[in-house]
């Protein structure tokens, strides 16, 4: 298999037949052996029924709505292609950009991400997305303009032994760059949504920001959590030491040691500093457990159907 197209799908009944037709047209011209994988993420409309009418197609049906990251992870694990393309099912990504992604990838990259420079979304969505992308660039030091664009192409080796949780699909470039893979970016088309409703909302923004800080911590301290928690603990020790020195000097000057809020704060900092260092040791133990864990996934697949 030359290339796999992975498409997480949730309540996109009118979009999936159109997208499939466009993909077949583009991929047929590329003269590559391909597979189109739709992951039905617990759709409650006619999405699954419409998918059954398509061919060629591989359908992975999840038992309920587990979220885009889980659906994407299931698709990645089922993909057989040497190259793997991920995209949305809402027709806002354009299949005609796939040849451009392949061309950019062949310039020496392991992953190429799409950049929706001219976005056809609401003003609120654009503002949140731009702020989030700016914050991600500052934290991860990777010059990607549009982390939120689902249209990406990967070499298969990028996604081996790779698991997605929460809302982590937005941070795949940062995770892979941290592992030493070379990340590129090209401008891609972005169309207005015609059918269905957007799944974007404040709830996803909140979850995305929590995952953002988790990924930052994981990238920097996944193999050495003691350095993170230990540094916080030592900083509190140093601050408490300054307080104690100030209190001792003050006691010599007034000939009495008063137990006031500042002294109690110093004692509290010693206690919390010790707790943070203990967290560091516990984190080291948990990390070693993580790297030797039994393989598991946070989602369950109901059935897989292949139609040629």
Image (cartoon, rainbow, N blue to C red):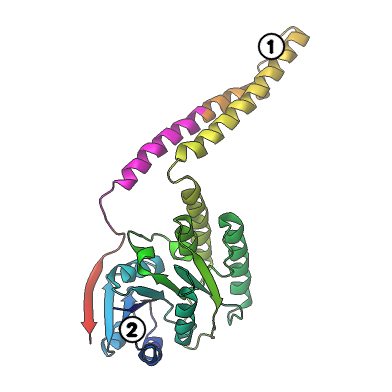
Establish if 168 lies above or below 21.
Answer: above
| Mark 2 lies on residue | 47
Q: Magenta part mainly helix, strand or loop?
A: helix
Query: Contact (CB < 8 A) between labels 1 and 2?
Result: no
Q: Is residue 157 left or right of residue 105?
A: left
Residue 214, percent from left and from top: 48, 52
Where, quadrant-wise, is the C terminus in this rendering? bottom left
- Which numbered marker is on residue 131? none
Where, quadrant-wise, is the N terminus in this rendering? bottom left
Residue 293, percent from left and from top: 28, 48
| Mark 1 lies on residue | 257
Q: Residue at coordinates 49% horizontally, 33% vertically from top-left?
A: 276
The secondary structure type at the circle numbered 1 is loop
Residue 81, percent from left and from top: 31, 75
Establish if 67 lies above or below 260.
Answer: below
Q: Is residue 27 magenta?
A: no
Q: In this orientation, does residue 267 appear? A: yes
Q: Quadrant of residue 187?
A: bottom right
Q: Which residues are magenta?
A: 274-296
Residue 284, percent from left and from top: 40, 38
In this rendered view, identify the residue nearer to me: 254 or 232: 232
Q: How many marks?
A: 2
Q: Quadrant of residue 4?
A: bottom left
Q: Is residue 12 left or right of residue 274?
A: left
Q: Residue at coordinates 53% horizontally, 29% vertically from top-left?
A: 273
């Amino acid at each position: 298999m030359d290339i796999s197209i992975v498409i997480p799908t949730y309540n996109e009944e009118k979009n999936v037949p159109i997208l499939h037709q466009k993909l077949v047209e583009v991929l047929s011209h590329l003269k590559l052996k391909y597979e189109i994988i739709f992951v039905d993420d617990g759709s409650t409309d006619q999405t699954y029924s419409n998918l059954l009418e398509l061919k060629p197609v591989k359908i992975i049906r999840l038992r309920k709505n587990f979220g885009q990251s889980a659906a994407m992870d299931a698709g990645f694990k089922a993909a057989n292609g040497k190259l793997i393309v991920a995209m949305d099912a809402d027709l806002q990504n354009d299949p005609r950009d796939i040849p451009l992604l392949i061309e950019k990838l062949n310039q020496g990259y392991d992953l190429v991400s799409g950049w929706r420079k001219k976005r056809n979304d609401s003003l609120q969505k654009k503002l949140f997305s731009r702020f989030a992308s700016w914050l991600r660039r500052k934290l991860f030091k990777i010059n990607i303009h549009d982390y939120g664009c689902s249209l990406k192409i990967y070499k298969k080796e990028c996604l081996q032994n790779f698991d997605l949780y929460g809302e982590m699909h937005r941070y795949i470039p940062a995770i892979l760059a941290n592992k030493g893979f070379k990340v590129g970016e090209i401008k891609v088309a972005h169309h207005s949504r015609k059918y269905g409703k957007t799944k974007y909302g404040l709830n996803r923004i909140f979850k995305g920001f929590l995952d953002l800080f988790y990924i930052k911590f994981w990238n920097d301290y996944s193999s050495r959590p003691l350095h993170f928690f230990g540094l916080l603990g030592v900083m509190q020790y140093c601050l408490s030491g300054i307080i104690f020195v100030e209190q001792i000097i003050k006691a010599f000057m007034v000939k009495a040691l008063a137990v006031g809020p500042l002294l109690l704060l110093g004692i509290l900092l010693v206690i919390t500093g010790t707790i943070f260092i203990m967290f560091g040791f516990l984190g080291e133990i948990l990390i070693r457990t993580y790297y030797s864990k039994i393989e598991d996934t946070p989602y369950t697949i109901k059935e897989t159907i292949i139609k040629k």
